[in-house]
Image (tube, grey):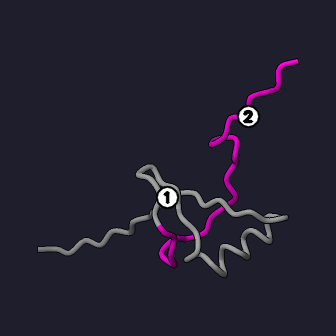
């Protein structure tokens, strides 16, 4: 019988408050264990198993209602 090995990837988002993208990425890389990852199945503590990717567009997650005049 053959052995097959698959690579799996976790996907989610982490919200980081910072003054710049560079500062946010640095905070996340240095303290990933202090954050929670939001996934399709809820939230879970972040750890080193998560690969930090590109900055996500917030428009996909938040809708801001325009003020009526």
* Quadrant including the C terminus: top right
Give the answer, above or below, for where 57 lies relative to 8.
Answer: above
Q: Earlier in the sequence, mark 1 or mark 2?
A: 1
Could you tell whether 52 is left or right of 69 in the image? left
Residue 38 on image: x %, y %: 52, 56
Crowdedness near tag 2: few (<14), some (14–19) or many (≥20) residues, C-alpha within 10 Å: few
Q: Residue at x 61, y 69 (%)?
A: 52
Q: Residue at x 30, y 72 (%)?
A: 5
Q: Residue furthest right?
A: 69
Magenta stretch: residue 59 in it? yes
Q: How many marks?
A: 2
Q: Residue at x 70, y 41 (%)?
A: 59
Element on which disc 2 rests: loop
Give the answer, above or below, for where 43 lies relative to 23.
Answer: above
Could you tell whether 2 is left or right of 41 in the image? left
What residue would you read off at disc 1?
A: 11
What residue would you read off at disc 2?
A: 64
What distance separates the C-alpha of mark 1 from that of mark 2? 25 Å
Quadrant location of residue 28?
bottom right
**What segment is highlighted magenta in the picture?**
45-69
Q: Main secondary structure of the magenta part?
A: loop
């Amino acid at each position: 019988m053959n052995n097959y090995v698959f690579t799996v990837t976790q996907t989610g988002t982490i919200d980081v408050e910072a003054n710049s993208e560079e500062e946010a990425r640095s905070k996340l890389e240095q303290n990933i264990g202090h954050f929670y990852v939001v996934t399709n199945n809820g939230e879970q503590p972040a750890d080193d198993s998560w690969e930090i990717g590109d900055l996500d567009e917030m428009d996909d997650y938040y809708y801001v209602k325009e003020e009526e005049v």
